[in-house]
């Protein structure tokens, strides 16, 4: 019989399993990892782990969802509270630059392997598509707000600008996974891209009018 | 005894093997494909195939190198012959948009899987790093030329602009592999990115002075 444990303990175990899975994924990506590897990393019994998750896919998605929730909450906070959308975006770029200079951030590889496998898994593809739309809508909302407040040019295509920004972030992370931050120099490329966005959004000219 | 065949026949067989491998990779990516799958696809005997290539990695790299040679030759031709670098870049964007709208272009997945695996294979990582440098130098040369001829602003950071463009292309291709062209709308995003590059390079203002 399974011993009774509290909700808080359940939540803690769930987090432990997700954390252990991510440690394995950092070392070996997504495809090569098995449930057996994850069970070993947790130090729990196989039975315990399967009580919470029935597959690697489920654990990985649980992690993705927690991570996305955090990102979406940040974007929502910017939308509601930031005195300037553009300054919040500049801050986001700086945070990204810092994270990308860390040479041991290897989770990107697992994320992109999972992403690339979407075409072979109908359910995963559906999930990725929903996630994609959520993320781009949250980003689009920032640009829309900046248009309304006059921070950005009214002609800006907010959805396309959001898509272009997300494409750039993923492309940059992909290059870093492939050849490393020393060769890519993420900070410099983020600065350059930020400058191109500033021009596209018409930030400077609108600020001049202040 | 192996029958004697001409150099032309050898080259043809080599191409056939590479072509067959790419067909398999289109269907199943890079990681999941084995030499056995490739041999089956060629319709040749195992011995014949191994006479030309000793591993999947070798075949894939041979394809990458042929492909890169074609791209580098195109960039070189633009550099030497194009009356306007910017117009040649616009043309490149249009070609990209067309290719990316093809829903059955699935080779991107195999390429990015290969790319992501670089971290675990020292030799592959070295090759990818060299490839990366070659590709960005060839792109940088275009922007440098545009600066010299006055087509672009003299303040442009040619290397960073080249990197940003390559990052964007790969990010876009990655998104298409993940969620499909219908959701990504590559043509629209390429247009938007092209506009941001135009502003960054100062193309319009320099044209105005013509």
Image (tube, coloured by chain):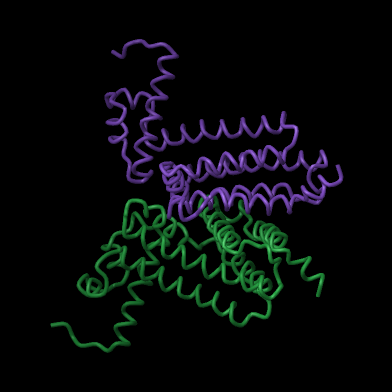
Chain colours: A purple, B green
Figure disc tally? 0
Depicted A67 relative to depicted B8: above or below? above
Depicted A52 relative to depicted A2: above or below? below
Q: Is residue B111 left or right of residue A145?
A: left
Q: In percent of the image, x 38 and y 72: which residue is there?
A: B19
The spot of residue A96 in percent (x, y) is 56, 42
Query: Which quadrant is home to the C terminus of chain A?
Result: top right
Q: Is residue A127 left or right of residue A177?
A: right
Of A173 and B93, nearer the camera is A173
Q: In percent of the image, x 33 and y 58: which residue is there?
A: B33
Q: In percent of the image, x 64 and y 43: which residue is there?
A: A136
The spot of residue B41 in percent (x, y) is 32, 68
The spot of residue B89 in percent (x, y) is 64, 70
Q: Quadrant of residue B28?
A: bottom left
Query: Which quadrant is home to the N terminus of chain A?
Result: top left
The spot of residue B162 in percent (x, y) is 57, 63
Of A99 and B42, nearer the camera is A99
Q: Quadrant of residue A76?
A: top right
Of A77 and B153, nearer the camera is B153
- As drawn, the residue found furthest toward the right would be A209
């Amino acid at each position: 019989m399974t011993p009774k444990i509290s909700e808080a303990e359940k939540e803690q175990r769930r987090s432990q399993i997700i954390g252990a899975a991510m440690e394995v994924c950092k070392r070996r990506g997504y495809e090569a990892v098995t449930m057996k590897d994850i069970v070993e990393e947790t130090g729990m019994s196989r039975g315990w782990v399967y009580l919470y998750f029935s597959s690697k896919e489920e654990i990985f998605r649980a992690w993705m969802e927690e991570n996305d929730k955090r990102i979406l909450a940040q974007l929502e906070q910017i939308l509601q509270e930031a005195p300037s959308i553009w300054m919040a975006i500049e801050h986001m770029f700086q945070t990204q630059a810092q994270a990308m200079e860390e040479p041991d951030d290897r989770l990107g590889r697992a994320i992109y392997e999972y992403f690339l496998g979407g075409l072979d898994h109908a359910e995963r593809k559906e999930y990725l598509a929903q996630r994609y739309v959520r993320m781009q809508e949250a980003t689009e909302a920032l640009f829309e707000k900046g248009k309304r407040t006059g921070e950005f040019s009214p002609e800006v295509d907010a959805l396309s600008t959001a898509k272009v920004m997300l494409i750039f972030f993923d492309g940059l992370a992909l290059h870093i996974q492939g050849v490393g931050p020393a060769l890519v120099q993420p900070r410099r490329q983020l600065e350059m891209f930020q400058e191109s966005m500033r021009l596209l959004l018409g930030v400077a000219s609108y600020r001049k009018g202040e």
